[in-house]
Amino acid sequence: MLIRTNETGRRLNDGHLAALAGDRVSSSEFRYRRGTEVFGEGDEPEYVYQIVSGAVRTYRMLSDGRRQINSFHLPSDMFGFENGKSHRFSAEALVETKVRIIRQRTLLCSMADHAGGTTNQGASPR
């Protein structure tokens, strides 16, 4: 079950997200109960996630029913970045887990703007 945990649903970022995006984006916080899927293999990668508390594993189900673990994510870890059109793995909360969620497209655009503003200062347009 997915539960929104903050009253407004949006907050300014801190930590890794702020460093990446330059405080130009806000996120929503959600809580996932133990065993709840965060996203599934093959889903469109619309969001990026940062763990506030708890733990998530990313995995793939093999044709013989076994689970192949990709990685474990702990507080302050970010996951869900994809360069393709779908998630290559599923993600599941191992314990009650609180995450910050931000749209991947918003984060990437903000990162590009932030990098452009810091690396191209004083450059003239061509």
Image: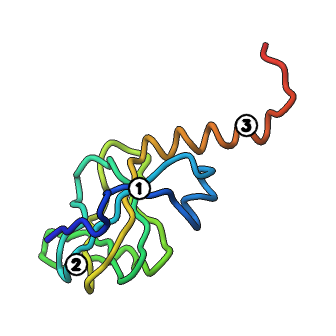
Numbered disc 3: secondary structure: helix
Amino acid type of the residue tagged 2 in the rendering: Arg
Q: Is residue 59 left or right of residue 25?
A: left
- Quadrant of residue 67 in the image? bottom left
- In front of the other: label 2 or label 1? 1
Tell me how far mark 2 sits from mark 3, CA to CA: 44 Å
What residue did someone put label 1 on?
27
Q: Residue 124, which numbered label?
A: none
- In front of the other: label 1 or label 3? 1
Image coordinates of residue 5 in percent, x first then y, are 28, 69
- In front of the other: label 2 or label 3? 3
Say which quadrant the C terminus sits in. Answer: top right
Residue placed furthest toward the right: 122
Q: Residue, x 23% and y 59% (percent of image)?
A: 41
Residue placed furthest toward the front: 7
Mark 3 neighbour density, 10 Å: few (under 14) some (14–19) many (20 or more): few
Q: Residue, x 42% and y 47% (percent of image)?
A: 104
Residue placed furthest toward the top: 126
Amino acid type of the residue tagged 1 in the rendering: Ser
Does label 2 or label 1 sit earlier along the sequence? 1
Q: Residue, x 83% and y 33% (percent of image)?
A: 121
Amino acid type of the residue tagged 3 in the rendering: Gly
What residue did someone put label 3 on?
117
Numbered disc 1: secondary structure: strand
Name the one closer to the observer, 82 or 113.
113
Q: Residue 67, which numbered label?
A: 2
